[in-house]
Image: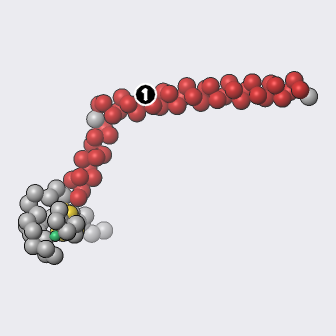
Amino acid sequence: MSARREFRLCQTCGRECEADFSFCPDCGCSLASSPSFFALLEGSFSRIEDGESKARIDELEQKLDDLERELDEFAGRVEAARVLRR
Ligand SMILES: [Zn+2]
């Protein structure tokens, strides 16, 4: 497998340029201020890993568990009603 290639997005024309390019080959703009594409990607992943988001995900998972339990109870009640009607 070849080494992962890093790209920067040109902020002027949006072209993907090799990370070690200093200038966009298309429009000639300086790429120095453009964050590397993979750095951006990794940045968004590490935000998920940080404490606040983790706590929020835990909270959502807890709510999902509660909801699932309520759904089970509801399904059980529906099933019971169906049995009674027979
Ligand atoms: Zn460009």
Q: Mark 1 belongs to which amino acid?
A: Glu
In the image, residue 45 above or below residue 55 = below
**Relative to residue 48, is residue 74 drawn left or right?**
right
Residue 22 in the figure: left or right of residue 48 = left
Instruction: Residue 43: give x, y in percent of width and height.
Output: 24, 47
Residue at the location (28% across, 35% down)?
50
Residue 79, how many percent across, how many down?
78, 29
Q: Going 55% across and 25% down the picture, which residue do you hit?
A: 66
Residue of label 1: 59
* Nearer to me, 24 or 3: 24
Crowding around mark 1 (Cα neighbors within 10 Å: few <14, some 14 to 19, many 20+) is few
Check the image and name the residue furthest to the right.
86
Residue 46 lies in quadrant: top left
* Quarter holding residue 20: bottom left
Q: Could you tell me residue 38's position as x and y percent?
A: 24, 56
Ligand 1 within 8 Å, label 1 CB: no
Residue at (27% x, 69% y) in the render? 2
- Image quadrant, ligand 1: bottom left
Which quadrant would the C terminus be assigned to in this image?
Answer: top right
> Could you tell me residue 3's position as x and y percent?
24, 66
Q: How many marks?
A: 1
The extreme front residue here reads 12
Q: Quadrant of residue 9?
A: bottom left
Q: Secondary structure at mark 1?
A: helix
Which part of the image, by quadrant, shows the N terminus?
bottom left
The colour scheme used to paint the residues is secondary structure
Q: Residue at x 86, y 27 (%)?
A: 83
